[in-house]
Amino acid sequence: MQLDVTQLQSEAVRRNVALGEINAVLTILETRGIAVSPEQRQRIQQCSDLDTASSWVRKAVTLSTVDELFDE
């Protein structure tokens, strides 16, 4: 069985970019003075999906509460 290095690299890049997005979400919320509970922070930090994390960045700019972040 041959390892697909390109796919592994791509997945690693997506995870790293998602991590950057997660940090951006937390920074935006902090800057806006929106309280984040330990449970909410943990849920945000556990996200490894780039699409979700990117969506959260956009939401973080306008939401009123962190709960709105998780609304679909």
Image (cartoon, grey):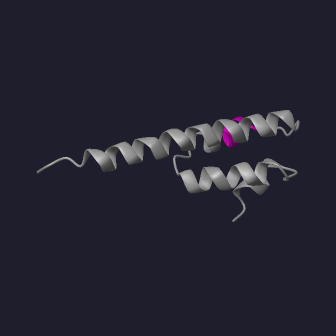
Quarter of the image holding residue 35?
top right
The image position of residue 2, as x and y in percent, is: 14, 49
The image position of residue 19, as x and y in percent, is: 56, 38
Indicate yes or no whether the magenta region holds residue 49: no
The relative height of residue 42 versus residue 1 in the rendered view (above or below) is above
**Farthest residue, direction front:** 6
36 relative position to 53: left or right? right
The image position of residue 70, as x and y in percent, is: 70, 56
Which residue range is magenta in the image?
36-41
**Quick one: 59 or 71, which is closer to the camera?**
59
- The residue at the point 71 percent across, 42 percent down is 25
**Farthest residue, direction bottom:** 72
27 relative position to 53: left or right? right
Task: Give the main secondary structure of the magenta stretch.
Answer: helix
7 relative position to 26: left or right? left
Which quadrant holds the C terminus?
bottom right
Quarter of the image holding residue 20?
top right
- The residue at the point 75 percent across, 34 percent down is 27
**Quick one: 40 or 53, which is closer to the camera?**
53
